[in-house]
Image (spheres, coloured by chain):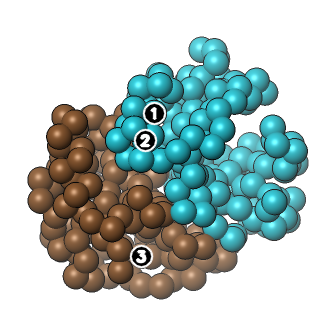
Chain colours: A brown, B cyan
């Protein structure tokens, strides 16, 4: 694993969250986009080599909406940049970890990504993201 | 804010968590130490310019123990490295954010740190850590 690519934070209202992370804490918005296949609108704010990724659910059935309903706003997942998402998945699978994505999906920027289920990883929703 | 200093993960058993983060995901243990005034034993595993910080409560009354009881294992807080912890606290206080530490405390390595209450920061427990 090369670095923390981003830390995802589930929020109800992106603009309210930007009032903290952009206006008070001084981060800048690198991008803001709707990702329909993940059911979210996301805002990326770089900090060092990583990003804060604010996530707002697009519908009540999205995973982020269920997270908000169950736990309220807060840190949702951590994403690590890896050289090879496929190899990372096979490594975990061989040791009995439960994958959400058995094969990588393609992200909105064309890079491969995959999620591991928090049930088998100490409650931590882990995402792998392919190196640029 | 310069970078993500670390992401803190609350766990019940450090060795069980190391079986994932060290043995499977390949991170190395930089340090392992007991921090009595925070009521935790911590293990630091660098990844890029940041660290994963595994936290185990030392007693049932520690903040991390309460977190585990309420929410189970999972991501507990995010720590940003800043040049000046005192200035970061005054900035948030002036805008009405609720601080856990109104003045910085001194960490186990002698650097200043402080926590901001998640009630006013979209459910995110934020820590500031002074630059080395």
Check the residue under mark 2 and report the chain it is in.
Answer: B
Provide the residue designation for mark 3: A43
Say few, some or many: other residues with alpha carbon within 10 Å of mark 1 (under 14 / 14 to 19 / 20 or more): some
B12 displayed left or right of B41 = left
At 55% across and 73% down in the image, what residue appears?
Answer: A49
Provide the residue designation for mark 2: B21
Q: Position of residue B119 (x, y in %)?
A: 59, 47
Q: Are marks 1 and 3 on the same chain?
A: no
Provide the residue designation for mark 1: B18
Q: Are marks 2 and 1 on the same chain?
A: yes
Front position among marks 3 and 2? 2
> Whole-Å distance between the Cαs marked 1 and 3?
32 Å
Q: Position of residue A88 (x, y in %)?
A: 26, 55
Check contact, mark 2 vs mark 1: CB within 8 A.
yes
B44 displayed left or right of A60 = right
- Check the image and report above or below for A71 versus B47: above
Q: Quadrant of the N terminus of chain B?
A: bottom right
Check the residue under mark 1 and report the chain it is in.
Answer: B
Disc 1 on helix, strand or loop?
A: helix
Disc 3 on helix, strand or loop?
A: strand
């Amino acid at each position: 694993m090369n670095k923390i690519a981003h830390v995802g934070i589930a929020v109800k209202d992106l603009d309210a969250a930007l009032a903290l992370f952009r206006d008070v804490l001084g981060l800048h918005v690198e991008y803001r986009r709707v990702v329909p296949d993940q059911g979210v609108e996301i805002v990326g704010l770089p900090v060092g080599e990583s990003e804060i990724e604010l996530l707002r659910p697009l519908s009540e059935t999205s995973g982020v909406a269920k997270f908000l309903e169950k736990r309220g706003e807060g840190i949702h997942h951590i994403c690590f940049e890896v050289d090879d998402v496929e190899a990372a998945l096979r490594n975990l699978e061989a040791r009995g970890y439960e994958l959400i994505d058995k094969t990588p999906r393609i992200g909105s920027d064309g890079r491969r990504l995959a999620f591991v289920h928090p049930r088998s990883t100490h409650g931590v929703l882990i995402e792998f993201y392919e190196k640029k």
